[in-house]
Amino acid sequence: MARKAKRDLTIEQQLARGPIDLPFLALVMLLTAIGLIMVLSASYASAMYNLTPNVTNTGGDPLYYFKRQFGFALLGLGAMVVISKIDYQHFRWMSVFALGASIVLMLLVFVPGFGRSGGGAQRWVNIFGIRFQPSEIAKVGVIMFFSAGLSKRSSQLGPPKKWSKRTFTGRMAARMDRIGLLELIPYGVVLVVVLGIIALQHHMSGMILIVVAAASVLFASGISLGWFAAGGTLVAGALLWIITKTEYMTARIDIWQDPFKDPRGDGFQPIQSMTSIGSGGLLGVGLGNSRQKYLFLPEEHNDYIFAIVCEELGMVGACVIMALFALLIIRGYWLALHARDRFGTLLLVGITSLMAFQVFFNIGVVTNFLPPTGISLPFFSYGGTALAIQLGEMGMVLSVSRQIAAPKAE
């Protein structure tokens, strides 16, 4: 009966039930487990002393952050399993709904009763008691929407349109079509809308990551490098304007260049981070033995958790974790190169690039190689919904990996 049922399945259904990529899954599980252990180690002091009762009331429970992170990890792993069993071709039509839902949720940030603020920024929303950043969903939505649209470039767009050269409008349209501008307009509009909403939330790190995710998909789809040069110049100009014209960003750059200008103010966090890293030495002070987590290093279980990793596990442990991230990223790109079709390739490139840049930016900030960006470390930084969404993204990668053995298709 089982064999007959299997024969009754369509080819597409049989392909979607193929084996997942075990090396990728093993790396995800290993990083998630290590991340949970480090959240437990880094957070119990601040949870026990209940430092921010107005924001997060831990009740003095030293396991408060760990238990929440562990719960969301289980939720994320469950979502990863479910998503990995979905035929990733369904993500094409889901992309519009994912993008639309993320835009609606980001707008809810500004609606009284739903929006939540913190640290001078309005970027959280609270629905049914769950507080999260809608920009996390927007990252996935942008990747899915761009991948679904750009995957049609070579096989489904058809021959170039014939524009009338008798009218000015026709001549301009023909010229824009020839240089590829018409093709990029829908994606540009989506990007401007999403980035505009995030800019109103004062969420610079979210803007950076969405630009990176969109650019990686555009690059993999074969968009002319000239557009990247133009876009890069525009982004560089915008960043320069923001840095030089906003007091907040100018202060961040000044502190990044010399944290000791204000050692008890804005420079305190990077100084303590570098102290944590330096005190770890080669082999570290031992798991759970960090001294900086005892109210010295701010955000020790969140954006700066890698400093605690360096202190407790030393340079050797930190290098092992970075090597695991490198292997996961390399495996993600390998799966992208061997995906069954262009959509799978673009989807995996977007997700893998997003994770790669998050790791790079976070470690760069913690080591003071880069100015503060507020970007968390995947699988490690405290943030339950972010972890659940990241594991859901890994489920999408595993869904594509099920059809790796299938013949290439456009």
Image (cartoon, grey):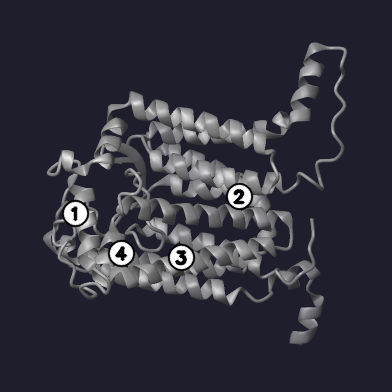
Whole-number angstrom distance, CA of label 3 to CA of label 4:
24 Å
**Residue 60: x, y in percent?**
13, 63
First in sequence: mark 3 vs mark 2: 2
Count of picture labels: 4
Which residue is nearer to you in this view: 381 or 253? Answer: 253
Q: What separation in Å lies between label 1 and label 4 (alpha carbons)?
A: 26 Å
Residue at horizontal 36 percent and vertical 72 percent from the top: 34
What residue is pinned by disc 1?
Answer: 272
Q: Residue at x 60, y 61 (%)?
A: 333
Tell me the CA gap for discs 1 and 3: 25 Å
- The quarter of the picture where residue 227 lies is top right
Q: Decide: few, some or many residues near mark 2? Use Cα within 10 Å; few <14, some 14-19, many ≥20.
A: many
Q: Residue, x 78% and y 23% (percent of image)? A: 175
Amino acid type, residue under disc 2 in the picture = Met
SS of the residue under disc 3: helix
Residue type, label 4: Arg
- Whether tag 1 and tag 4 are in contact, CB under 8 A, the answer is no
Query: Mark 1 or mark 3: which comes first in sequence?
Result: 1
Q: Residue 144 got which mark?
A: 2
Q: Which residue is mark 3?
A: 325
Which tag, 1 or 4, sits closer to the chain's start? 4
